[in-house]
Amino acid sequence: MARERFPPLPVYRWGASVPYLEAARRQEEFVARRHECLILCEHPATITLGTGAGPEDLPGTGEFYRRQGIEICRSPRGGKATYHGPGQLVGYPIVNLRGRGITIHGHLRFLEELMIAACARFGVSAHRVEGKSGAWVGEKKIGFVGIRVRQGFAFHGFSLNITPQGDSFRWIIPCGMPGLEITSLHEECNGRAVTVWEAAEAVEEAFFEPLELETGIRVAPR
């Protein structure tokens, strides 16, 4: 069966403090319209609980998280608990997997390789770990993935730590892995100041290089 033909894929850079639930709502609207795009943004301090998360993933009380200024949100993505906050790049690729002939597993692996490629642009050697999701530097996790698929469209996506986020991740059981060590580009670049939007440029370049070859996606003119 021939694959569908697609218009160029637009890139949206939202503000630096887009609330998580607002981002989730807007993604739902894009999926309903069958609108493919790549969204790059930051969120205020938020703990998200994926479909596999339970009370055991939040050691603190609701009052404790409120005192820290952290919102707790249920998310339709897969996975357990993770943290989003300032200094972390969040990417939401909304992609027609069915139309492009991409498997769910293949899309998840691509998101991991995307973060690894972006890290390499700053001289950081990240990698995948067999049997675990995300992007890793040594034994530490630097990038996270969690998606939802509806009617063949993938949404939600990935997050990449740009500045140190470790303290906030200690307030949850990240990815259901007690004692998981967290790192960031800033820490792995020997203190080099990498901004979120410098990292966004690297992610965008890495996103379209392989997809241009494999699935026919093109960057929309700006």
Image: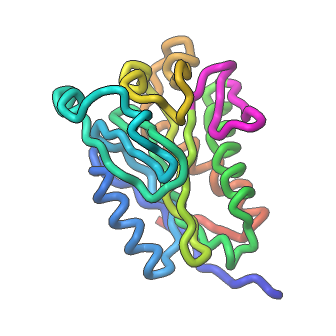
Residue 176, compared with residue 32, is above or below; it is above
The answer to whether any part of residue 220 appears in the image is no
> 149 or 15, which lies in front?
149
Q: Which residue corresponds to the image point at 48% horizontal and 61% vertical from the top-left?
A: 11
Tell me, yes or no, whether the highlighted magenta stretch contains residue 172: no
The answer to whether any part of residue 193 appears in the image is yes
Q: Position of residue 148 (x, y in %)?
A: 53, 61
Residue 17, compared with residue 13, is above or below; it is above
Instruction: Check the image and name the residue furthest to the right.
Output: 1
Q: Position of residue 51 (x, y in %)?
A: 48, 53
Q: Which residue corresponds to the image point at 43% horizontal and 40% vertical from the top-left?
A: 197
In the rendered structure, which segment of residues is drawn in magenta?
125-142
Q: How many marks?
A: 0
Q: Position of residue 220 (x, y in %)?
A: 54, 68
The image quadrant that residue 165 belongs to is top left
Instruction: Check the image and name the residue furthest to the top.
Output: 190
Tell me, yes or no, whether the highlighted magenta stretch contains residue 138: yes
Name the dominant secondary structure of the magenta segment.
strand
Q: Quadrant of the N terminus?
A: bottom right
